[in-house]
Amino acid sequence: MRAARTNHAWAGRIRTRSNGRARVLRLLLALCALPAVFATATPAHATDTTPDTRATTAAPARGADPAPDTQAAYLADRLRENPVHVTDQLPREVPRSTAPDFARLAKKTGLPTYLLVLPMQNSTDGKELLGAVHDRLGRDGLYVLIEGTDVAEATAYGVRAPAEAALTVTRYELAYDAGPLLSFERFVDVIAQGEEKAASRAEAAREKYRDEEPAEMYIGPSDRQNQSFLTGILLTGVPLSILLLAAYARRGRTGKPALRLMVPGVALLSAAAIALTAPVVFDETRSSAARLPTPAEMSARVERVAAGLKQDPVYADPESPRVLDARQRDRLHERIRDFRRSDGGGPVYISLVPQTPESESAGDPDLFAAAVHAKVGGDGVYIVADPDDGTIDVLNHGLRLDSSHLSFDLPDSLTLGDSRADEADDHLLGERLDRLMTFLDETPRTDRPQSEPAPAAAPRAADEHTLPALYSTDFWPGLFVGAFAALLLTGLVAGATWIVRGLWRRHSPEPEPFDSLPFTAPTQPSTSYLRRTAYAELTALGAQFTGPNDRGGRSGDLLDAALLLVDGDPGRTRRPGVDPATLVAVIVLARTGRAARTGRPSNLCCGVNPLHGPAEHRHHVRVTADGNRRRLLPVCAPCHDTAVAEPGGIPGRLLKLPDPALGNTRLPYYDITDSPLTAVPDGIGRLVDRVRGAAGVH
């Protein structure tokens, strides 16, 4: 297509050289035009004067073959009307009222800038889409694609712009919750700096944030609940602690009346200071950068789809890739007509529209179908097919069809697809929708019309991104916890602390207490628990050896491997710097060594949770709550019983640890790739080899 535009420009220059070459020029132009006459696609070169450009985006008549790049043609037409196109499918995150702000920012580039704000599309390559839109529009400039809330792609056509550097800076410098407007503003600022400065800034951002993420800009409702809970604890815990500790300190003593009156005053001042300071420290009011959409923006997409369904019972979202060809559309139209004429049948409305959490229905296809049904105003079967993930939902509104049959007997191969559908770009939606029509033909009829129950309302957009007040939610439970914490603190200060420390000093040199260490195996252990347990287990194993010459055999090898993980110092397990995965490896090695010392050796450790101890079987177990992904793991007796009796319970028993690369996100221990724990499913011997190899010991 770009070659065609070059040929036209070259022919124009030839025309100016002499009139004698005009005939040759006309012949060349005629030859260049022949492919366009016979091609099924629309012309590659589109300008404002091209007469049929917008006709390519109109809904084709039944039986006509729509343009193969309908999505690009539609988006090109939107950009021809306005260089900034904001979809109507993301009102909760990017309402269309933000278009003027995007346009204002786009002017700062100093270049012709064309911006598309679209839903996230897993099946579409952003760079290819921008190229196709540019070829359709026929205008050079900077083309930018925002998917969801992030600047996803940018390409310069016919102009010089540091698009790649600007993308790098935006992705590295901003937190994931920065929002589309701030992301585009940062992108535009880098473009305006020029190529040299933009390249330097991109390299600096890449180096600075290579191993860390920028701090989040907003907090969520759970964070606000934690803030409220902490405020409540402090508001009662601190004043009560002052009163109780002061009373304990002067127990059995007589003090001046002025001093006795000072303590309540200090407690009251501390409560007032906390009550006044907490709203200043926890001053967040919103959980995201999203603006509040208007009611018209929240209903725009539903109205668009309903209007399309009134014209054609098969509506394909023009902003999404085409998943039905002309033959499949004709087939669906024929099946819909036959079903409508059948006994107990009726209208069928198919919406090929993506369902995203940012849409008016918050990604709920039942809610979307109910809204479309209300706008269309006619009963029928409403089918919602997502062209992005390939899911299909079927809802009966007012036909004499057995709704329970539609709800419970639809095969997963129709609603969710199979492996073939997952691998296909179109998710085989045409084939599956045709099979779905056969299923509708065979659905039992009822004496009276049936309808789906009204779905639960979606969250209010006004509340979705607004944080609750600080003095609400968990603030009230925090008050009671604070009072209890004050009592507990006073008791600890009175005697529990020195008793525990005394017992620890008295018995720590002896191995007996460690032989009876409590056996615990949490699924999501805290770092403090892992430090305490690793130190206790490692110290207990070391105390069972009389000296360095006694470190022979399997238990000695396990002790040496555990010490390699902490550089030979058991005390390192109690100090920051040792990651949770390493602490778990120390515990596993130490416990296995102690078992071998007592004559109970085992080479297999439970692969579901290594803290469970020795394994007795190998079993294919489910390792994810969503889906049916399985893995062959050694399992202990309780995990084996669970895998047989309740396979879905295994994911809840998996040991999950925080991944340093992902912050607080917890992963199954064997997915933390830089940890020796990945060798646990292969046996304790493999774990020892992995530890020795990492330490350079053979």
Image (spheres, grey):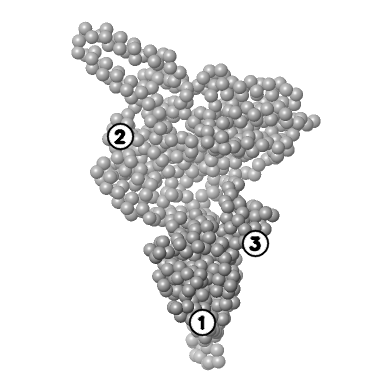
Asked whether disc 1 touches disc 2, contact meaning CB atoms under 8 Å apart, the reply is no
Q: Is residue 300 above or below residue 640?
A: above
Residue type at the position of mark 2: Leu
User: Are circles 1 and 3 on residues that touch, CB within 8 Å?
Assistant: no
- Picture quarter with the N terminus: top left
What amino acid does circle 1 point to? Answer: Ser
Q: Which residue is mark 2?
A: 111
Circle 1: element type: loop
Asked which quadrant contains residue 404, the reply is: top right
Q: Position of residue 51 (x, y in %)?
A: 40, 17
Q: Amino acid at mark 3?
A: Ala
- Of the numbered discs 3 and 2, the one sitting upstream in the chain is 2
Q: Does any portion of residue 262 appear in the rendered image?
A: yes
Spatial CA span between label 1 and label 3:
33 Å
Q: Residue at x 52, y 63 (%)?
A: 684
Q: Dot 3: few (<14), some (14–19), or many (≥20) neighbours within 10 Å?
A: some
Label 3 sits on a secondary structure element that is helix
Q: Residue at x 69, y 54 (%)?
A: 645
Residue at image location 65% in from the left, 34% down from the top: 394
Q: Earlier in the sequence, mark 1 or mark 3?
A: 1
Separation (CA) of disc 3 from disc 2? 68 Å
Residue found at x 47% / y 69%: 557
Circle 1 residue: 508
Q: Which residue is mark 3?
A: 637
Label 1 or label 2, whichever lies nearer to me, is 1
User: Residue 21 location in percent, x, y?
Assistant: 23, 9
Q: Is 191 displayed left or right of 228 in the figure?
A: left
